[in-house]
């Protein structure tokens, strides 16, 4: 069974930074692309960033390109999302997801098989 556990959310002022982490259990991590999504109240879940199983390929939503960085440590079975220059509109619950057997990143939520419970990020103005 694959479990994803996010951490690192919290309250931060606009312009600040946070680093989210997603620890995974199970054997899928080294062969699975990983992604981060977010969902604000009343809005649909939206793609933020994704990374290939090897870490060699990354993809970002236009709204976070240049501000957010996704990375993974295969030795620790952990994926990270470094978020800089945060804006109030970044406020949402952030979810980590794993594609399972696919090694390539995707922007589509339906492409991900496993999901964490999410961690709340709140950016004050």
Image (tube, rainbow, N blue to C red):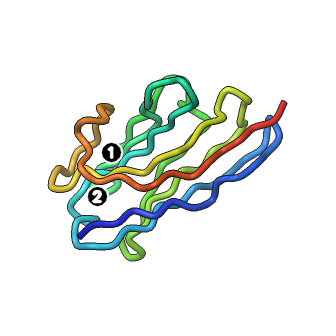
Q: Does dot 1 land on a helix, a strand or a loop?
A: loop
Quadrant assignment for the C terminus: top right
Residue found at the very far left of the displayed protein = 101
Q: Which residue is mark 2?
A: 54
| 90 relative to 55 in the view: left or right | right
Which of these two is toward me, 73 or 97? Answer: 97
Seen in the image, is 59 located left or right of residue 106?
right
- Res 106 quadrant in image: top left
Name the residue rendered at 22%, 65% in the picture. Answer: 28
Residue under numbered circle 1? 57
Task: Classify mark 1: residues with Cα within 10 Å, few (<14), some (14-19) or many (20+).
Answer: some
Please state the horizontal and vertical placement of residue 57, each as a whole percent of the image.
32, 45
Q: Nearer the viewer, residue 85 or 22?
A: 22
Q: Residue at x 48, y 49 (%)?
A: 70
Q: In the rendering, at what x and y percent does residue 118 appear? A: 50, 51
Establish if 53 lies above or below 109: below
Quarter of the image with the N terminus is bottom left
Q: Are marks 2 and 1 in contact (CB under 8 Å)?
A: yes
| The image quarter in which residue 23 lies | bottom left
């Amino acid at each position: 069974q694959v479990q994803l556990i996010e951490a690192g959310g919290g309250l931060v002022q606009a312009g600040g930074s946070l680093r989210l982490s997603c620890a995974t259990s199970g054997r899928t991590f080294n062969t699975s692309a990983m992604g981060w999504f977010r969902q604000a109240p009343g809005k649909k879940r939206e793609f933020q960033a994704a990374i290939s199983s090897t870490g060699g390929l990354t993809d970002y939503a236009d709204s976070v390109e240049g501000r957010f960085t996704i990375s993974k440590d295969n030795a620790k079975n952990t994926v990270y999302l470094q978020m800089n220059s945060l804006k109030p509109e970044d406020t949402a619950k952030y979810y980590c997801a794993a594609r399972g057997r696919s090694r390539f990143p995707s922007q589509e939520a339906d492409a991900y098989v496993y999901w964490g419970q999410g961690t709340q990020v709140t950016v004050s103005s």
